[in-house]
Amino acid sequence: MVVPSPNHPIHNQKERIKSIGVPVIDLSNKRSIVSDSIVKACEEYGFFKVINHGVSKDIISKMENEGHDFFAKPSLEKLKAGPATPLGYGIKNIGFNGDFGEVEYLLLHTNPLSISQRSKSISNDPIKFSNVVNDYIEAVRDLTCEILELIAEGLWVPDKSIFSKLIRDVDSDSIIRINHYPSSLQHMSDNNNRIGFGAHTDPQILNLLRSNDVDGFQISVEDGVWVPVPSDPAAFYVNVGDALQALTNGRFSSVKHRVLTNSNKSARMSMIYFGTPPLHACISPIPELVTPQKPSQYRPFTWDEYKKATYALRLSDHRLNLFSVQQQSE
């Protein structure tokens, strides 16, 4: 799929919009119920909403305020934090292969030293910015790892940290992204949606998204069918990434998703934590999910290998297919 220009509306006769409720996981429920519910949601949707997550409103609001403060700056000021290579400030261009959308963003590595260095070109108060971002990362990392441990329990894997330890590793390649989709009131007359961020899956293990109260996020439950996901600033939305699909031997599916912009009076802003293994980590189906009836679907690969493949391809390309056992044998 070639991502259309943000200056042109989407015209795809094969697309359908389907309104269905996405799974809602209440982390305050009994642990066994929660773990089973998460596994089911990952199998059926690759996506779910988390409530009663334990991340404080104060940590969230401070992070959101830092995003607002940055994106409110004049363009020339924001450009000092770029270009995104891939870290830093980017606008419209997504990646290196011709994808673009009606979005501006900050992409940061979660390493505190990296944040400290980049904060100098992002904020007028770099120490405050670094502290706020680090506090937010710590909170969402803990939540991500808790969810991954619940997944391991739901899959009856003896080592409950089999997924989470990849993210807790000191060399984790995790990143955080703040996306800002400006209001498109100037296009109200044509009453059509435009690409904010094109259709894609995420390459990482597990990702946590939190946005303001402006809609636009959609997931694809089947080819050509898109489900709008209403924003809920009090909740986190969780999606399975390609690496977790490989680790679970295809039992979970990495969900395709996108963001559309429309004629909202307000801009949409989202903050996404991408839980990622270290570059040297080997990704392959865990032994508990490989059987004679369900042999390994993916060859072993390192995160570094997969990351390079991601950067070499378009947003919508099926990267994981390159590492499938079937692909290798053909």
Image: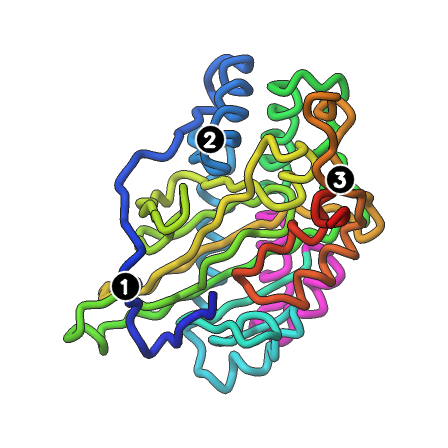
The answer to whether residue 177 is above or below residue 90 is above
> Percent position (x, y) of residue 129?
59, 62
Q: CA distance from mark 2 to mark 1?
A: 33 Å
Is residue 207 magenta-colored?
no
> Percent position (x, y) of residue 59?
51, 46
Residue 166 numbered mark, or none: 3
Please tell me whether mark 1 sits on a helix, a strand or a loop: loop
Direction left: furthest residue? 189
Q: Nearer the viewer, residue 278 or 313?
A: 313
Is residue 134 magenta-colored?
yes
Q: CA distance from mark 2 to mark 3?
A: 24 Å
Reading the image, the residue beneath label 2 is 44
> Percent position (x, y) of residue 216?
33, 56
Q: Is residue 50 left or right of residue 298?
A: left
Reading the image, the residue beneath label 1 is 266
User: Which label lies toward us, 2 or 3?
Assistant: 2
Residue 18 numbered mark, or none: none
Q: Which residues are magenta?
A: 110-137
Q: Is residue 1 left or right of residue 16?
A: right
Q: Amino acid at mark 3?
A: Leu
Rendered residue at 39%/29% (across/down):
24
Majority secondary structure of magenta residues: helix
* Residues under numbered marks 2 and 1 in contact, where contact means CB atoms less than 8 Å apart: no
* Residues under numbered marks 3 and 1 in contact, where contact means CB atoms less than 8 Å apart: no
Q: Nearer the viewer, residue 152 or 224?
A: 224
User: Which label lies toward us, 3 or 1?
Assistant: 3
Q: Is residue 124 visible?
A: no
Rendered residue at 28%/67% (across/down):
11
